[in-house]
Image: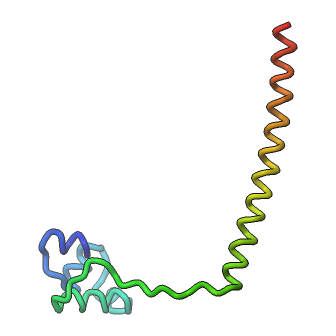
């Protein structure tokens, strides 16, 4: 719909359906799209959709932190393993040059 607005085309269910290669019936079934098309059609034009920010619960924060800590531990272990492998390869190269 943003492209249609930028091109100066009217926002109607038929125009949006053709642009998106979907049926108008499908558009009418999608509550969010239907509402947005009606809003744009009525002239209340806002290119960005309003966002509702809900605060993150303490449990969600704790789960995110735990996941990130696990990821850090995994990456640190992988880093240690790769450093050891690199030391071995450097040692082999040094022996070949002697």
State the image coordinates of residue 85 (x, y, percent, origin top left).
83, 34
Direction top: furthest residue: 98
Q: Position of residue 72 (x, y in %)?
A: 74, 58
- Look at 20% across and 73% down and name the residue there: 4
- Is residue 77 found left or right of 57 in the rendered image? right
Q: Is residue 36 above or below residue 20?
A: below
Who's the residue at 13% across and 75% down the image?
A: 9
Q: Residue at x 67, y 82 (%)?
A: 60
| Picture layout, residue 42 above or below residue 23 | below
Q: How is the image coloured?
A: rainbow
Residue 43 location (% of width, % of height): 16, 88
- Residue 36 figure quarter: bottom left
34, 71: nearer the viewer: 71
Q: Quadrant of the C terminus?
A: top right
Location of residue 41 in the rendering, given as x and y in whole percent from the top left corner = 18, 88
Image quadrant for the N terminus? bottom left
The residue positioned 64% from the left and 87% from the top of the image is 57
Q: Nearer the viewer, residue 47 or 16?
A: 47
Say whether residue 94 is left or right of residue 11. Answer: right
How many numbered circles are shown?
Answer: 0
Where on the picture, by quarter, is residue 37?
Answer: bottom left
């Amino acid at each position: 719909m943003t492209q249609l607005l930028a091109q100066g085309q009217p926002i109607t269910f038929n125009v949006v359906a053709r642009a998106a290669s979907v049926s108008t019936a499908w558009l009418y079934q999608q509550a969010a799209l239907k509402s947005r098309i009606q809003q744009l059609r009525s002239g209340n034009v806002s290119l960005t959709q309003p966002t509702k920010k809900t605060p993150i619960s303490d449990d969600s924060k704790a789960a995110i932190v735990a996941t990130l800590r696990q990821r850090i531990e995994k990456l640190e272990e992988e880093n240690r393993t790769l450093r050891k492998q690199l030391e071995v390869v450097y040692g082999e190269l040094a022996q070949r040059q002697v």
